[in-house]
Image (tube, rainbow, N blue to C red):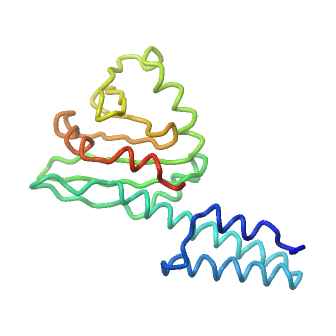
Amino acid sequence: MSRFPLLPALVACLGVSAATGHADEILDTIDAARAAYEAGNIQDTTEELAYAQQLVRDLKTAGLSAFLPGPPDGWSREIGADMGAAMAMLGGGVGAEATYTHGSDSFSVTLMADNAMVQAFAGMLGNAAMLAGGKRVRIGSEKFMNQDGELTGLVDNRILVQASGAPVETMLPLLESMDFEEMAGFGR
């Protein structure tokens, strides 16, 4: 029996393909962790596994960022560089954010997946009475809450989608362009 029996399962669960350059670095790092473990170097094993986890989070973040729509005509889009620190404070998971700008007008769209805060928020979004002053809005097949112009929805009970900073009628078409069905399969 292998001294590192969970390694094949870890790689399979990640759904990582060796075809991507990033996946090669992940697999190389996992291999380095295994070699350190087999050599009895627990400290290096821990460090390599932590680095492999970071690489996987980076890969997932890039995948989540792909769901941020391009800018509307006449607008520009800037994707936030790193939500990693914020996600760590919010219980882990991954996140992506884009700011859309047109002259002095701007708004942001934030996506957060697979973290404790999103799971806790799921119950609140399902119960409109818990969100004082909130109004339900349907965007495609998804239900969003409009609370004072901030639109918040939950895709597949694990991916929070939030748009804020502009009038609802400005943000709504951008959210309507998002593929929530495809998003539901994110990370699986």
- Quarter location, residue 171: top left
Q: Where is residue 12 drawn, in percent x and y?
A: 65, 65
Q: Is residue 28 above or below residue 174?
A: below
Residue 13 placement (x, y as % from top left)? 64, 61
Name which residue lies at 31% across and 41% down.
163
Quarter in which the C terminus is drawn: bottom right
- Compared with 169, 56 (above or below) is below
144 is higher (above) or lower (below) than 106: above
Q: Kindly identify the residue that appears in the image at 44 percent across and 41 percent down.
A: 160
Identity of the residue drawn at 63% across and 78% down: 27
**Above or below — where is 176 with respect to 23?**
above
**Left or right: residue 58 compared with residue 134:** right
Q: Answer left or right for 121 relative to 51.
A: left
Residue at figure coordinates x 81%, y 76% from the top left: 43
Query: In this view of the protein, which residue sits in the foreground, 184 or 85?
Result: 184
Quadrant where the image shows the N terminus: bottom right
Q: Give residue 145's quadrant in the image.
A: top left
Front residue of 103 and 58: 58
Left-right relation of 106 to 46: left
Q: Where residue 181 appears, x then y in whole percent?
A: 38, 44
Relative placement, left or right, of 81 versus 11 is left
* Near-viewer residue (121 or 142): 142
- The count of marks equals 0
Indicate the position of residue 17 as horizontal and vertical percent values: 54, 73
